[in-house]
Image: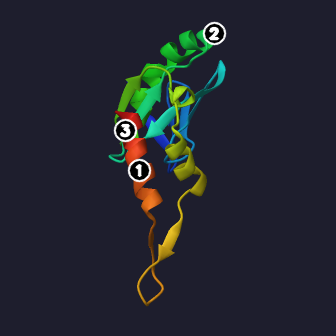
């Protein structure tokens, strides 16, 4: 009999092969747990519902990552999420310009909307969205 999955939470599954996979949140982070122990997979949720899985930077974690990768991929597909593999995350290597830093410090500010006091995204939101899109390319 082949492997079967059971959904144990909205973001988690358990396999008949003895492991569980749980997404930490929609933005990323996956917890894999089996008889060997727990392993956190660095990941990033994309707008289309798919996830980028990053190889670990630490050499000592790479063999474990490679051994669990097929399990994580099947579990994510069961949850309805396609995955793609990337080299280690480069977020720590990003060089920020003074302009980028100024935008990031202001964060996601808002301006007053129309006379009904509705809120609308500030220009900073759009600038950060463009920056994140550029970093992902």
106 to the left or right of 55: right
Q: Position of residue 136 (x, y in %)?
A: 39, 35
Locate residue 48 relative to residue 87 in the image: left or right.
left
Q: Earlier in the sequence, mark 1 or mark 3?
A: 1
Q: Mark 3 vs mark 2: which is more N-terminal? A: 2
Q: Secondary structure at mark 2?
A: helix
Q: CA distance from mark 1 to mark 3?
A: 9 Å
Q: Measured along the vertical axis of the image, is residue 110 above or below residue 14? A: below
Residue farthest along the right direction in this orientation: 37
The span from disc 3 to disc 2 (Cα, nearest Å) is: 31 Å
What is the spatial separation of the Cα atoms under label 2 and label 1, in whole angstroms?
34 Å
Vertically, is 22 above or below 120? Answer: above
The residue drawn where x is 50% and y is 20% is 55
In the rendered image, the residue lying farthest to the front is 98
- Which residue is tagged 3? 134
Q: Tell me if label 1 and label 3 are in contact, CB under 8 Å.
A: no
**Where 40 sits versus 128, above or below?**
above
The residue that appears at 50% across and 13% down in the rendered structure is 67
Label 3: which secondary element: helix
Residue 48, image x, y percentages: 32, 46
Which residue position holds label 1?
A: 129
- Point out the frontmost of discs 2 and 1: 1
Q: Mark 1, residues whose alpha carbon is within 10 Å: few (<14), some, or many (≥20)? A: few
| Residue tagged 2 | 60
């Amino acid at each position: 009999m082949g492997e079967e999955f059971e959904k144990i939470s909205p973001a988690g599954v358990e396999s008949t092969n003895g492991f569980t996979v749980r997404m930490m949140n929609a933005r990323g982070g996956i917890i894999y747990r089996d008889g060997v122990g727990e392993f956190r997979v660095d990941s990033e949720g994309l707008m289309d519902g798919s996830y980028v899985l990053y190889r670990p930077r630490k050499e000592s974690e790479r063999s474990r990552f490679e051994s669990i990768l097929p399990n994580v991929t099947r579990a994510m597909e069961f949850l309805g999420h396609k995955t793609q593999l990337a080299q280690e995350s480069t977020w720590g290597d990003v060089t920020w310009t003074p302009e980028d830093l100024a935008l990031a410090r202001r964060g996601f500010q808002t301006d007053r909307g129309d006379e009904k006091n509705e809120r609308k995204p500030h220009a900073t939101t759009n600038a950060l969205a463009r920056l994140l899109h550029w970093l992902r390319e």
